[in-house]
Structure formats: structure tokens, C-alpha cells
Image (tube, rainbow, N blue to C red):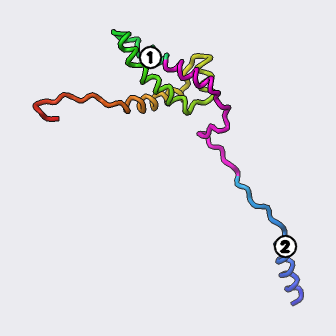
Amino acid sequence: MGALTLCLAVTGCSEEKEQKPAVAKAERNPFDHSHDVQVTDVEKHKFEHDFAEQCVQRELRNSTDKAADEARWQEPCMCIATYLMKDLTADEAGKFITEHKNTQSLVIKFENAAYHCLQAKAQPQGPKLFGKP
């Protein structure tokens, strides 16, 4: 009986140790860019204007009326560049500004920005045939 009491007392006392709370390991989120080097405002501004200019020049390559088309593309290209600038990483800005390269992530963001900026505009109405819309 005494041995049983002693066993219960020893196992009961072993729980008195101060246990450290279990710390969950923070898993790295590959889509979280908060740990990246921040892009400075000067780099963002330069990127915005350089990208908008490149966008306009790309649209003017096959244009027949360059003067009219340049004025028409200024606003949408600036909208796209501003939209891209919001999620710009230092790596993307550096490669675009210094090496004049478009990274794959920048191409994907461009397609999303182009959709956002160009769909926001009111589309011209289609032809009305025989009085029906």
C-alpha cells in the first residue's frame, strides 16, 4: 500500500515542472513579399514613367496614325503602369530599370493590369439592327 502511494505521489509531482509553451514554426509563405527589399519612391516613379512610355511605343509599332494613337494610348498605359507599381518588387524594378528586361511575374501582372484598366472604360455600343438592341 505504501509503495502504491509513493508511486502516485512521484508521478503526480513530475507534472510540477514549468512547461514551455509550444511555439509553432512560422511557415514561409512564398507569396508574402514583406521580407523583400522595399522599392524606393524614386524607383517606383521611374518605373511608372518608363513602363508607360514603353507601353505607348509598343502600341504605336503597327499604327498608321501615330499622332492620334499616341494621345489615345497615353492614359491607358499610365493606368497599367500605376496598377503594376502597387505590387512592384525590388527585383522586378531593378531588372526593368537597369537591364531593360521584363520578368515573367511582371508579364503576368501586366496582363492583369491591362484587363483591369481596359475593362473599366465604357465600351462602344454595337450596331442596332432593325431597331433591336
Residue 35: percent from the left, percent from the top?
67, 37
Residue 57 position (above or below residue 45): above
Q: In this view, does 9 lie to the left or right of 33?
A: right
Residue 53: percent from the left, percent from the top?
49, 16
Q: Is residue 110 left or right of residue 26?
A: left
- Between 82 and 5, the one nearer to me in the picture: 82
Residue 55 position (above or below residue 127): above
- Between 11 and 35, the one nearer to me in the picture: 35
- Residue at the image position 61 percent from the left and 21 percent from the top: 95
**Residue identified by numbered label 2:** 14
**Measured Cα–Cα span from mark 2 to mark 1:** 74 Å
Identified by mark 1, the residue type is: Val
Q: Is mark 2 on a helix, strand or loop?
A: helix
Identified by mark 2, the residue type is: Ser
Whether 29 is among the magenta residues is yes
Which residues make up the magenta segment?
Answer: 25-52
Q: Earlier in the sequence, mark 2 or mark 1?
A: 2
Q: Residue furthest left?
A: 130
Image quadrant where one finds the N terminus: bottom right
**Residue identified by numbered label 1:** 56
- Between 12 and 40, the one nearer to me in the picture: 40
User: Image quadrant of residue 34?
Assistant: top right
The label shown at residue 48 is none
